[in-house]
Amino acid sequence: MTASSLSVPPPPDEIRIGGILVMCAACGARCDWMVVRDRSEISIRCRRAHQWGEQEPTRADYEAMIDVGGQDCPSPEAAARDVG
């Protein structure tokens, strides 16, 4: 298993964590997310490359965010590079 797992939900999917809509504080984006799991940490990155760590998501929340699919990458940096 690689250290990081990446998935980009197809637009216009929104992500909810604990029932609360995820929204980028920097640009207001509400969809087109890249979700990165690096060991036990989860980060969310918007389409404008603003990225932040999320403290609340459980493994079940992560699985619900990525649904089916995703791409395994060796690091969060590689995940960002591979997606663009």
Image: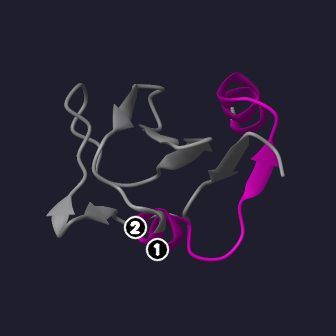
Residue closer to the observer: 35 or 57: 57
Left or right: 46 with respect to 1? Answer: left
Near mark 1 (Cα within 10 A), the count class, few <14, some 14-19 or many ≥20, is some
Magenta stretch encompasses residue 37:
no
Left or right: 5 with respect to 31? Answer: right
Taking the spot 46% from the left edge, 52% from the top edge, the residue there is 32
Residue closer to the observer: 17 or 8: 17
Q: What range is drawn magenta here?
A: 60-83
Give the CA separation, mark 1 to mark 2.
5 Å
The amino acid sitting under disc 1 is Ala
Image spot of residue 75 (x, y percent): 74, 29
Task: Establish if 5 lies above or below 19.
Answer: above
Residue where numbered disc 2 is placed: 61
Q: Are marks 1 and 2 in contact (CB under 8 Å)?
A: yes
Q: Quadrant of the C terminus?
A: top right
Residue 31 image-quadrant placement: bottom left
Q: Residue furthest front?
A: 40
Residue closer to the observer: 47 or 17: 17
Image spot of residue 4 (x, y percent): 70, 41
Taking the spot 55% from the left edge, 66% from the top edge, the residue there is 66
Left or right: 23 with respect to 77? Answer: left
Image spot of residue 35 (x, y percent): 52, 48
Taking the spot 23% from the left edge, 46% from the top edge, the residue there is 23
Q: Which mark is residue 64?
A: 1
